Amino acid sequence: MMRQKVKEGGKRGISINMLVFILGILICASLLTYIIPAGQFDVNPETKALIPGTYHAVEQTPVNLWNALRNIFTGMTNSAKVMSIVIFMGGALKVIISTGAVEEFLNWAIYKLQKKGIAVIVPLMVILFSVLSAYGGNDSFFAFTVIGVAVAAKMGLDPIAGMAMTYFATSVGFAGALKGRTLVAQGIAEVPLYSGAGWRTVWLFVITGLAVAYALWYCFRVKKNPARSFMDNTDWIVGGPQGDIKKELFNPMSLLVIVITAGSFILNAVMGVLKGWTYPEQVAVLLIASTVCGLLYRKSPTEIAESFAKGCQSMGFVAFIIGLGGAIALTMTQGNILHTMVNAVAAPLMHVNKGFGTIAMFWFNWLFNFFIISGSGQAAVVMPVLNPIADALNIHRQVAVSAFVYGDAYTNMLFPTSASLLGALAIAGVPLKNWVKFVFPFLIILSVLTSVFLYYLTAAGWTGM
């Protein structure tokens, strides 16, 4: 299940096949129905939430392996809405990305900024990559590392500084994204899509500000004394990776595409709160936005349709993983062990402030992200467990979604199971151990502050509406 995989540039990283791993969890769930004592909480007939303090033992109902495998299809049908929005969003974003507008705008901005000083270019690049990653980025953003390294070299900085301005910034922005795994988690938690966007956007600005401050600190440190670089040497001064920054003329259409993309997410979030928009309206908005973006770049209807189809295809496996996660939850429910596991986790936390329960969920996801680096895949596996834990602790599921979202996102820039991280390291020529020296202190600071933020949301009774 776990194996060594050689990456570009001779780097080695741990690769875990997600399908094998999650199928293994399904098999384990089947076996556990024979071992773990069966039990249930009483359920609120209106909200379907667990009623705290009502856990009681019930008759053992083990689920054999054959029935667990049969649950895969049922899990997929039960997850149809979430799977559909994931596939559709994959198609819509592919149309937008295929225009090249985001890359065009970034290339123009970096070309214009490259001669500015550290105090100007570092904050602007971090903010730019963070915000664009949050509203319009995808996994291929790590490729901009080559440009970041080139800009850093021009300013007399090391490759880690180049990664800080690009890959590091996109990872921070990913944490605040309203799309992707956030929507999957909300769908599984049965809270309105895009709800909670206000506070998540505020936190995006906060963590982006922290990233700016941290990147500036490091860049000024290296500029003042190159020997203090976390590269452990100064070979990068003469032999570091170089890259040409192509001259790019400003195209107003590229900015318009970015505005339309971000605007579609904001519109869905606002109208979801004001008018109760759900899946049908949100899908329609994304379809219109992506089509308009394609037409602005003079793509024919056929080209737009082909890009949309490719995007849908790319999310097919992710959709299957979501259905497989539903099968795991269904197997544990049929075996009456899910509530037993929830009670085992929740019981010790019943006697402390429930804010600590939210923090525990966050750190669980922080660590579990090592095994399932895909945000949507992780949501499919962990949210069916976090939902009843949140119910048992009387924590709103919207807060549980945030605990998942941040726990899933942060360690993408740390764990070697992330293909994007290994790709960025390969491009920059930075060993993993040297990158950890840079990123780990920031992650601890960020995670501690996020724990405080989640505690506040819990204490305030935040519902996202």
Image: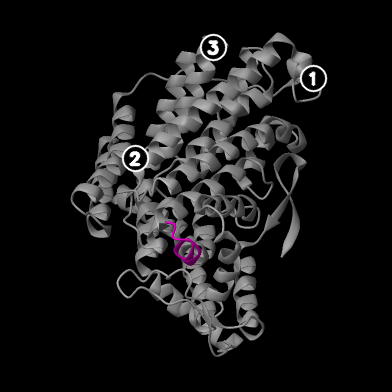
Q: Position of residue 5 (x, y in %)?
A: 73, 53
Mark 3 vs mark 2: give the one in front.
2
Question: Separation of disc 1 and disc 3 at Cα?
Answer: 24 Å
Q: Amino acid at mark 3?
A: Ala
Query: Is 457 included in the stretch rendered in magenta?
Result: no
**Against 383, is 207 above or below?**
above
Question: Separation of disc 2 and disc 1 at Cα?
Answer: 45 Å
Question: Separation of disc 3 and disc 2 at Cα?
Answer: 29 Å
Q: Main secondary structure of the magenta part?
A: helix
Q: Nearer the viewer, residue 251 or 200?
A: 200
According to the image, label 3 marks what residue? 119
According to the image, label 2 marks what residue? 198
* Residue numbers of the magenta segment: 388-395
Mark 2 vs mark 1: give the one in front.
2
Quadrant placement of the N terminus: bottom right
Q: Is residue 238 toward the left or the right of residue 319 in the image?
A: right
Query: Is 393 included in the stretch rendered in magenta?
Result: yes
Q: Position of residue 153 (x, y in %)?
A: 65, 17
> For the residue carrying disc 3, how many other residues have a C-alpha within 10 Å: few (<14), some (14-19), or many (20+)?
few
